[in-house]
Amino acid sequence: MHETRRANAELHPTVIREEWYGTYYREKGADRNNLLRNPGVLLQSVAQEVALLRALRLIRPDLQATRVLDVGCGEGAGMMTFLRAGFLPRNLSGLDFQEDRIFHARQLLPGINFICGDATCMEFPDGTFGLVTESTLFIHSVDQALSTKIAEEMIRVTCPGGHLILTDWVYSKPGSAAHKALSSKRINALFAVGDRTMRLSVFRGPLVPPLGRFLSSRLPSIYFLVQSMLPFCVGQITTVLKKV
């Protein structure tokens, strides 16, 4: 039993993601994504937040009542946008598989409900949340069966007529087995678009990392011009779905 549980954990997409990020920061340095110390990440972060805010403006949630779940929330940084947008902390929840990340999230944002749990088997009743989100979770979820379970759970805990916002990378990293792009086709399959959900809109986010980081640090004045004029250079897309 213990060996089976350990084997399942090793295959879990959030564990794969955690291991990848551990290697990533060892190779790139602790300041790789620091907004103050690394100018290359600044406009990448801004572009991601702008895409999310545009998605929220589209669905017009009730800021006083809408319950939000962020699946794969990590240390809770993504919740900052929802707080700035006016959502009530008591209506915000984040779920992540890693206990240390949840510990840090609770320290950072004590007013939000952070839960250490399994995204493939969430302990919420059906239709608990008006909005369910993820941010760069599926790019590291390379196992199709586990990805399907996560998507099914995200749909299940979304209330009828509620929304799902998927913020993820649309290109895989060449030669990397730890990446699987969340393409439009993959979204259609995972989230049963046309059956259980409908696609409302998509919003362009950050540019592909090498280009985006270069422009952010060296030519920030043309970053959003490139994003607008050269859509194939956009690496991350925010997709809005509605549960039907």
Image: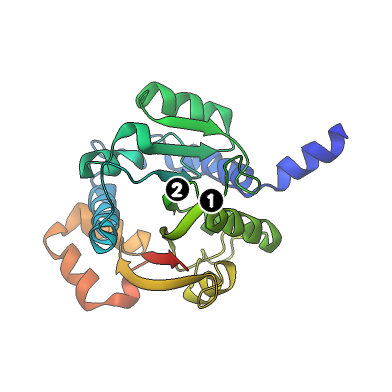
Q: Residue at x 26, y 45 (%)?
A: 63
Residue 43, position in %: x, y?
23, 53
Q: Mark 1 — residue?
A: 157
Q: SS of the residue at dot 2?
A: strand
Above-or-below relation of 27 to 229: above
The answer to whether residue 52 is visible is: yes
Q: Residue at x 62, y 49 (%)?
A: 13
Rendered image coloring scheme = rainbow
| Residue type for callout 2 | Phe
Mark 1 to mark 2 CA distance (whole Å): 6 Å
Residue 112, position in %: x, y?
38, 30
Residue 4, position in %: x, y?
84, 40
Number of other residues with Cα within 10 Å of mark 1, as a class: few under 14, some 14 to 19, many 20 or more:
many
Above-or-below relation of 31 to 100: below
Q: Mark 2 — residue?
A: 129
Q: SS of the residue at dot 1?
A: helix
Q: Mark 2 and mark 1 in contact (Cβ < 8 Å)?
A: yes
Number of other residues with Cα within 10 Å of mark 2, as a class: few under 14, some 14 to 19, many 20 or more:
many
Q: Between disc 1 and disc 2, whose residue precedes?
A: 2
Q: Residue at x 27, y 52 (%)?
A: 49
| Residue type for callout 1 | Val
